[in-house]
Amino acid sequence: DAGVTQSPTHLIKTRGQQVTLRCSPKSGHDTVSWYQQALGQGPQFIFQYYEEEERQRGNFPDRFSGHQFPNYSSELNVNALLLGDSALYLCASSLGVASSYNSPLHFGNGTRLTVT
Amino acid sequence: AQKVTQAQTEISVVEKEDVTLDCVYETRDTTYYLFWYKQPPSGELVFLIRRNSFDEQNEISGRYSWNFQKSTSSFNFTITASQVVDSAVYFCALSEAYSGGGADGLTFGKGTHLIIQP
């Protein structure tokens, strides 16, 4: 039973560039959430996708956008990268839109993004 | 606004000692959910427990136990007879229920780095 998979594992970008991170949810899950974890901090909620629509969003600028595909996989896009965007980006999947409670989040190993 | 505070940045104990990780939360909602996650060096967050605001019963799972006290807004986590494999960063998290009846994204604390020395 495949868990949550994320790609790439590591990524180095330059300020001003754009980046796309990818996530495949755990088998049987239909909801994907993205979190940003800066070094030494707890993860921060970016947004959640269900039925190919953004359902909830945290306090992140519009430079952060996403997409969910019919097979439930998801992408996180960040435009005009800033040095402060350097972090571990975690994808989590679950079942159903009311997912934080009804179905605990299953996290991937994350993508480590470094912006220089 | 919701907030989770884990005041202990790092705890170091010798194997077989008991250790308690503290978690204090703030929320205006009467319906909310509390979680603990473990993050080993690999980076993946591993779900340990969830508790809703209406269930104040303490829970024990093997060497792990959780003490939920609404009166002090705390949800503490105790590891009994700690082992080296317990070494990790532990996060407490909170989720509020929005009006649609579902649950919002998780708000995490900053985590407690637990070091179990052999």
Image (tube, coloured by chain):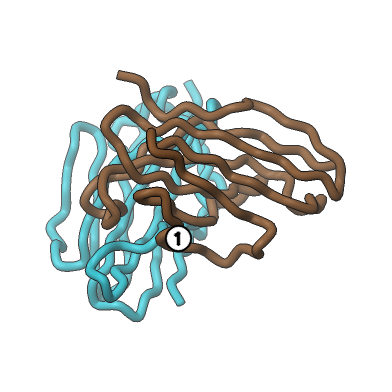
Residue B3 % position (x, y): 46, 69
Residue kind at label 1, given as amino acid type: Thr
Whether A26 is drawn above or below A17: the answer is above
Asked whether residue B43 is in view, the answer is yes
In the visual, does B56 lie left or right of A110?
left
Q: Which residue is mark 1?
A: B107
From this viewpoint, which residue is outermost toward the front?
A70
In the visual, does B65 lie left or right of A81?
left
Question: Which residue is more in the foreground, B107 or A2?
Answer: A2
Whether B62 is drawn above or below B108: the answer is above
In the visual, does B6 lie left or right of A89?
left
Residue A28 % position (x, y): 26, 32
The residue that appears at 28% across and 76% down in the rendered structure is B99
In the visual, does A114 lie left or right of A69?
right
Dividing the picture into quadrants, the one containing residue B26 is: bottom left
The residue that appears at 26% across and 71% down in the rendered structure is B100
Dividing the picture into quadrants, the one containing residue B104 is: bottom left
* Chain shaded brown: A
* Chain shaded cyan: B
Task: Determine the secondary structure under disc 1.
Answer: strand
Which chain letter matches label 1? B
The residue that appears at 43% across and 72% down in the rendered structure is B2
Residue A19 % position (x, y): 71, 41
From this viewpoint, which residue is outermost toward the bottom?
B28
Dividing the picture into quadrants, the one containing residue B96 is: bottom left
Question: Which residue is more in the foreground, B72 or A99?
Answer: A99
Q: How many marks?
A: 1
The residue that appears at 24% across and 46% down in the rendered structure is A103
Crowd rating for badge 1 (residues with CA inside 10 Å; few <14, some 14–19, many 20+): many
Asked whether residue B38 is in view, the answer is no
